[in-house]
Image (cartoon, rainbow, N blue to C red):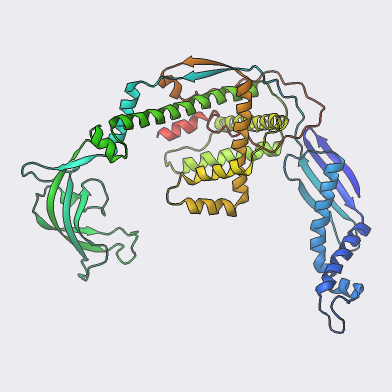
């Protein structure tokens, strides 16, 4: 096998590989021997077909398999012999290949950079902490009660209005044939007027009616209604209102706490405080991690593989364009925003390589049990669909590996925090929860001196998407 270097620019390499026809023929013969074992040929017992006959009959058919095998094996050997550290899959282009001829192909690949990692021992990191006051607990309880409104029967004889809850019977039929359909009738049904739970126009015709009223509601099913036999058809509903209720605000007391599964109000307040403590702790860690990533970014400056940069940029761009596509008023990415995305992509790739290098030095591993717990955590986000989530990860190993990267990163971050000089600073809840300035960009220091040592960072990517600065225009679009 002959290897010729076509180009070598920074982290990008292009090589031309020539595999002699004799070497290829050895592989072809080995493959044909396997074919002969099971091939059936009149006049010959199984496994006794002559090689020349097998070559004529199956030779062309096995050439495709041989090509793939030889290219893969040759590529692997070139990488090992030249001690290259690919940053991704090499791009292969076959230039010459035919029976009885040499195989010539080119391989283009980016390699991982060599760099020195800064000493992380004693790094100074701020830890913002916020004290939970009764005020925050009260505000949280107010949000909870707003989602658990009750109702009570109205006093007097007034007519219904939007926001009321009516208890009613209804029975419907399609207007063109007077046929009653399944699902168009109910007794003692509760309906909040203005909630848009029923088809358009139904709830509007319920307004202004008193308890005991009997009347018809005339509506049209939407053209894209879920039941095809009703879509676009007119319908008549016979309605009788039994009671009218007013919505009441839930009151935080022992009775309300018991409705939510707690022993008393004190138990509910303790649970809310515990949840707030957890939320604020997560925010504290996120800000600490963001500060740490900024430090790592400031102290490492080296070339990164263009392929990794392009892949990260494409992923970020697709994500933002997908979000904007859901907002008719959102504008396309400007040139300035695209430049900002390039800066973010470069930062993420560089941080991923730095964290991978630190993790390798510290022998950080993510075991199967930790990965399984991550899958369980993901499944818990979809109540009632846990089985589907588990099956999804079982059938998609690559998606399972995507859960490994953030676990790996968090382990590395924890190691650095254990060695850091952490200064606690008490701040207000508002300051702790405040978003970072999305327009700011980290300023980089002088490049770290490159090392000649052969390092093999794991292919992990820094998962600081929530921490990174995002294009300002993305924030503006979200507000529209």
List x then y, in percent, for residue 398: 62, 48
> Is residue 261 shown above or below 391?
above
Residue at 73% across / 39% down in the picture? 87
The front one of 42 and 174 is 42
> Is residue 142 shown above or below 44?
above
List x then y, in percent, for residue 307: 70, 39
Residue at 83% across / 80% down in the picture? 41
Q: Determine the image quadrant of residue 110.
A: top right
Residue at 60% across / 25% down in the picture? 293
- 255 relative to 409 in the view: left or right: left
> Is residue 9 shown above or below 203?
above
Furthest residue in direction bottom, as rendered: 43
Furthest residue in direction left, as rendered: 157
Number of labels in the image equals: 0
Location of the C terminus by quadrant is top left
Furthest residue in direction front, as rendered: 263
List x then y, in percent, for residue 285: 52, 26
Q: Determine the image quadrant of residue 352.
A: top right
The front one of 217 and 432 is 432
The front one of 74 and 414 is 414
The front one of 281 and 307 is 281
List x then y, in percent, for residue 67: 82, 58
Residue at 64% across / 36% down in the picture? 461
- 30 relative to 118 in the view: left or right: right
Q: Determine the image quadrant of residue 139.
A: top left
> Is residue 329 shown above or below 440?
below
- 286 relative to 419 in the view: left or right: left
């Amino acid at each position: 096998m002959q290897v010729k270097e076509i180009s070598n620019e920074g982290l990008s390499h292009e090589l031309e590989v020539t595999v002699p026809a004799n070497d290829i023929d050895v592989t072809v013969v080995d493959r044909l021997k396997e074919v002969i074992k099971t091939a059936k040929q009149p006049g010959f017992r199984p496994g006794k077909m002559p090689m020349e006959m097998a070559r004529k009959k199956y030779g062309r058919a096995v050439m495709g398999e041989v090509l793939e095998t030889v290219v893969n094996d040759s590529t692997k050997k070139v990488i090992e012999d030249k001690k290259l550290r690919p940053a991704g899959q090499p791009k292969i282009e076959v230039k010459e290949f035919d029976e009885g001829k040499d195989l010539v192909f080119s391989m283009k690949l980016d390699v991982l950079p060599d760099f020195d990692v800064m000493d992380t021992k004693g790094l100074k990191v701020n830890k913002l902490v916020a004290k939970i006051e009764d005020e925050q607990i009260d505000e949280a309880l107010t949000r909870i009660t707003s989602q658990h409104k009750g109702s009570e029967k109205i006093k007097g004889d007034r007519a219904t209005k939007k926001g009321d809850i009516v208890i009613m019977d209804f029975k419907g039929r399609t207007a063109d044939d007077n046929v009653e359909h399944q699902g168009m009738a109910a007794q003692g049904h509760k309906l909040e007027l203005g909630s848009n739970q029923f088809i358009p126009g139904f709830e509007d015709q319920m307004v202004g009616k008193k308890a005991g009223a009997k009347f018809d509601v005339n509506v049209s099913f939407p053209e894209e209604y879920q039941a095809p036999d009703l879509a676009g058809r007119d319908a008549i509903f016979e309605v009788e209102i039994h009671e009218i209720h007013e919505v009441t605000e839930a009151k935080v007391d022992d009775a309300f706490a018991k409705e939510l599964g707690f022993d008393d109000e004190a138990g509910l307040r303790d649970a809310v405080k515990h949840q707030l403590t957890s939320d604020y702790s997560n925010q504290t860690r996120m800000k600490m991690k963001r500060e740490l990533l900024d430090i790592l970014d400031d102290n490492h400056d080296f070339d990164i593989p263009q392929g990794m940069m392009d892949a990260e940029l494409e992923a970020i761009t697709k994500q933002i364009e997908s979000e904007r596509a859901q907002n008719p008023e959102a504008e396309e990415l400007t040139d300035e925003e695209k430049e900002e995305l390039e800066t973010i992509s470069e930062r993420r790739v560089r941080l991923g390589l730095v964290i991978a290098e630190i993790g390798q030095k510290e022998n950080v591993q993510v075991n199967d049990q930790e990965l399984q717990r991550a899958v369980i955590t993901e499944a818990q986000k979809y109540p009632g669909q846990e089985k589907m989530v588990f099956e999804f990860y079982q059938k998609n190993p690559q998606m399972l590996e995507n859960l490994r990267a953030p676990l790996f990163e968090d382990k590395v971050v924890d190691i650095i925090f254990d060695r850091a000089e952490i200064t606690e600073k008490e701040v207000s809840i508002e300051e702790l929860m405040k978003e970072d300035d999305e327009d700011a960009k980290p300023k980089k220091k002088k490049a770290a001196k490159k090392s000649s040592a052969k390092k093999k960072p794991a292919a992990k990517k820094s998962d600081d998407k929530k921490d990174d600065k995002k294009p300002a225009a993305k924030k503006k679009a979200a507000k529209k």
